[in-house]
Image (cartoon, grey):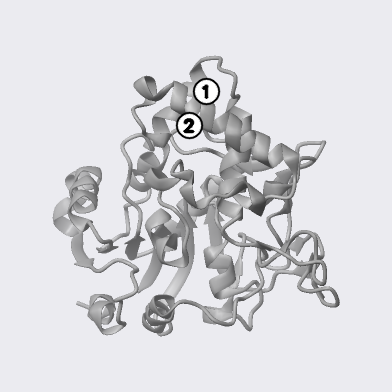
Amino acid sequence: MKIAMFIGAGFSKAWGLPLASEIMDMRDIRTNLFPGKWQRKLIDKVKAVWDATKPTHKGVVDEFARMLQQFEYELSFEEFASFLALRLSSKHWKVGTAHETKWGTGDHIRKQQVVPKCYQEFLKVLKNVDLIGIVTTNYDLVIEKLLGPTSSGRLGGFNYGKVGEHLLGRHPLSSQWTYGPITVTGKIPLLKLNGSLNWTLSSDGQILKYIDSRPSRGRRYEVLLIPPGAGIKHDKLQPVWEHAGQILRAANIWIFCGYSIPDYDQAVKDLLKNSIKNVKRIIILDVKPKPVKDKLRDLLGNSRDSVSIYVGPGITSQLNARDIAHLMKPS
C-alpha cells in the first residue's frame, strides 16, 4: 500500500515549534537573541499592531493575517511574513559566541543526529512502509533535520520534489567547520505548500533554496512564505501544489499528523477533495483527533463509505511505536 503523509504544526510541537495559536505569544522571544536592530524593531512593530487591533482579530493569528491583507495598517502583510519567518527560524538556531560565529548555528537542513525520542518512535513505524511523499503546510525545518537531504538519511532522506536539486549557501557549524552547498539525493518528496524558511525569491522571480534559514533572518532576502489564513497561493508555488496532488492521488493510505484542517484553508480542502480517488484508509495522529475526523468525513462526501478512518495518538513525548504500528497493518 502506498502511503502519503500530511503534516501540520502539531507535528513540530514536540520539537519546540509553536502552534498557530501560540505564534503571537512572544514571551519566549527575548530581543537579545536577535543581533540586528531591524529584527528588534520588527518584533516591536508587530506586537504594537497586534495589541492595537485585538478587537478586530480577537487574538486569532489567521484573522490577523487576513486583516493585514485586506486593509492598510502600520504593519504590512509582507512585514508580517518576515516576522513569522524570524519567529520560527529562531527556534532552529542560537547565537554563537565570539569563538564561534556572530550568527547562529543549527538552522540548517543537515540531518540532526540526536532527535527527540517521540520522533524516533514514529520513524520506527515508517521504516517498513511505502512512504511515497510528505505534504505539509509547515514552514519549519523539522522534517528536513529529521530525515536529512541525502540518500543516507533516515528513511532514505528527503528532496523538495526533485532529486539532484542544488541547495545554496555555506553554513558555519563552528569557527572551523562549515556545511554546504549540497546536492539533494534523498528519495522522499517533501512538498511545502506554503513555502519554507529556507526559500527565497530571486530578483528575477525564481525560487532559490538554501541549506539554512538565512532568507528568514536576513533583510536582503524576500522569504517565500505564505502566512496562515492569507487565503492565497503564490504562483511560484503552483508546481509544488501540483506535485502534492500527484502524491495524494497515487496513495492508498493518507496519514494526517498534527494538521487540524482549519476552516480558513479552503485551498488545502480543495486539494484533498480532488485527490481522494484512490484512498482506502485514513489515519489521524493527533492529540485532538475528533474535529479532524469530522472534517475529513465532510470532505469525503460520497466516498465516505469506502474509506476507513483510524485514530491514533499525536506526536508527543509519550509516543510509543506500538501505539500506531497496528494502524499501518493491512486490513
Secondary-structure class at tag 1 = helix
Q: Identify the residue shown where x is 20% and y is 43%.
A: 298
Q: Residue 129: x, y in percent?
A: 39, 79
Nearest the eye: 146 or 55: 55
Q: Residue 98: x, y in percent?
A: 82, 67
Asked where in the image residue 53 lies, by quadrant, the reply is: top left
Nearest the eye: 144 or 294: 144
Where 311 sits versus 207, above or below?
below
Q: In the image, what residue type sits under mark 2?
A: Ala
Nearest the eye: 120 or 310: 120
Q: In this view, which residue lies farthest toward the left?
A: 305
> Can I make out residue 222 in this image?
no
How far apart, in angstroms, are the residues tagged by discs 2 and 1?
7 Å
Q: In the image, what residue type sits under mark 1?
A: Gln
Q: Identify the residue shown where x is 45% and y is 27%.
A: 51
Q: Is residue 98 left or right of residue 201?
A: right
Secondary-structure class at tag 2 = loop
Q: Identify the residue shown where x is 23% and y is 45%.
A: 295
**Residue holding disc 1:** 69
Question: Which quadrant of the figure contains the N terminus?
Answer: bottom left
**Residue holding disc 2:** 230
Where 172 sits versus 102, above or below?
below
Where 166 sits versus 321, above or below?
above
Q: Is residue 253 left or right of residue 111?
A: left
Q: Residue 262: x, y in percent?
A: 33, 41
**Mark 2 Cα-neighbour bin, 10 Å: few <14, some 14–19, many ≥20:** some
> Can I make out residue 202 in this image?
yes
Q: In this view, which residue lies farthest toward the top?
A: 72
> Would you say the residues marked 2 and 1 are in contact, meaning their CB atoms lie under 8 Å apart?
yes
